[in-house]
């Protein structure tokens, strides 16, 4: 179950912090005690920035790292598209078809074989969906956006994935 890629992601500390500098959104999994807090902001260029604190299992830590990598540097609309794609993938049984974080998302998707552990995978993503970056007047529930421009590695930050995407 704990593939090498998930263990590698769980040890990635580029987006993990001891204290958040932005207003945080915290979520807890009562079944296992995992806790994650996301600090999400939009910088002066209109790009999303995600940092997190967590006391959690390797699956939750890996998922938080993949989330932070996937949406940091995106415009909010593109981050929302990625959030929707991830949550739909986690809820289904289809193969990952996204063009970002392919290796990492496939590894997280393999946890679907263990339904009780999927709460660990979803925890950071669901917390991200509760943040204010999507605009209080619009809310996360707005549908129909497919714009994904602005999610590349143009900011020069290293990427988790090594499959040539993202």
Image: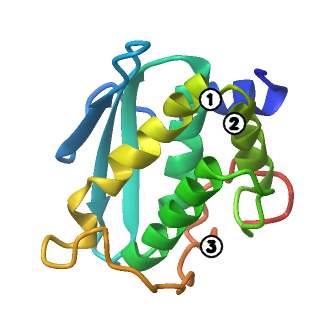
Nearer-N-terminus badge (2/3): 2
For image coordinates 20% across by 73% down, the residue present is 135
* Mark 2 neighbour class, 10 Å CA radius: few under 14, some 14 to 19, many 20 or more: some
For the residue labelled by badge 3, is the local secondary structure a helix, a strand or a loop? loop
Q: Left or right? Give the position of 132 relative to 155.
A: left
Q: The C terminus appears in which quarter of the rendering?
A: bottom right
Q: Out of 86 and 91, give the one closest to the viewer.
A: 91
Comparing labels 2 and 3, the label whose residue is closer to the camera: 2
- Please give the name of the residue rendered at 70% of the width and 64% of the height, measured from the top-left corner: 100
Can you tell which mark lies on residue 115? Answer: 1
Mark 1 to mark 2: distance in Å?
A: 5 Å
Q: Secondary structure at mark 1?
A: helix
Check disc 3 and report the residue beneath it. 152
Report if residue 14 is visible in the image. Answer: no
On screen, residue 113 versus residue 26, left or right, reads: right
Q: Residue furthest top?
A: 32
Tag on residue 112? 2
Image vertical order of residue 132 relative to residue 143, above or below: above
Q: Looking at the image, which residue is at 79% across and 33% down?
A: 5
Where does residue 162 sit, x and y in percent of width and height? 83, 52
Q: Nearer the viewer, mark 1 or mark 3?
A: 1
Residue in view at x 54 percent, y 85 percent: 146
Q: CA distance from mark 1 to mark 3?
A: 32 Å
Res 107 visible: yes
- In the shown orientation, is residue 156 left or right of residue 44? right
Q: Secondary structure at mark 2?
A: helix
Residue 30 spot, x, y in % from top left: 34, 18
Farthest-out residue, left: 137
């Amino acid at each position: 179950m704990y593939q090498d890629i998930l263990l590698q992601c769980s040890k990635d500390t580029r987006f993990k912090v001891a204290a958040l500098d932005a207003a945080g959104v915290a979520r807890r999994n009562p079944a296992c005690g995992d806790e994650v807090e996301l600090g999400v902001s939009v910088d002066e260029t209109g790009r999303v920035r995600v940092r997190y604190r967590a006391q959690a299992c390797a699956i939750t830590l890996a998922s938080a790292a993949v989330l932070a990598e996937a949406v940091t540097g995106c415009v909010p609309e593109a981050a929302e598209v990625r959030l929707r794609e991830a949550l739909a993938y986690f809820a289904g049984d289809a193969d990952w078809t996204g063009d970002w974080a392919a290796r990492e998302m496939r590894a997280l998707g393999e946890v679907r074989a263990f339904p009780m552990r999927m709460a660990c995978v979803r925890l950071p993503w669901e917390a991200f969906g509760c943040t204010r970056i999507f605009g209080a007047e619009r809310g996360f529930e707005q549908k129909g956006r497919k714009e994904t421009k602005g999610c590349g590695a143009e900011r020069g930050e290293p990427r988790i994935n090594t499959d040539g995407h993202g």
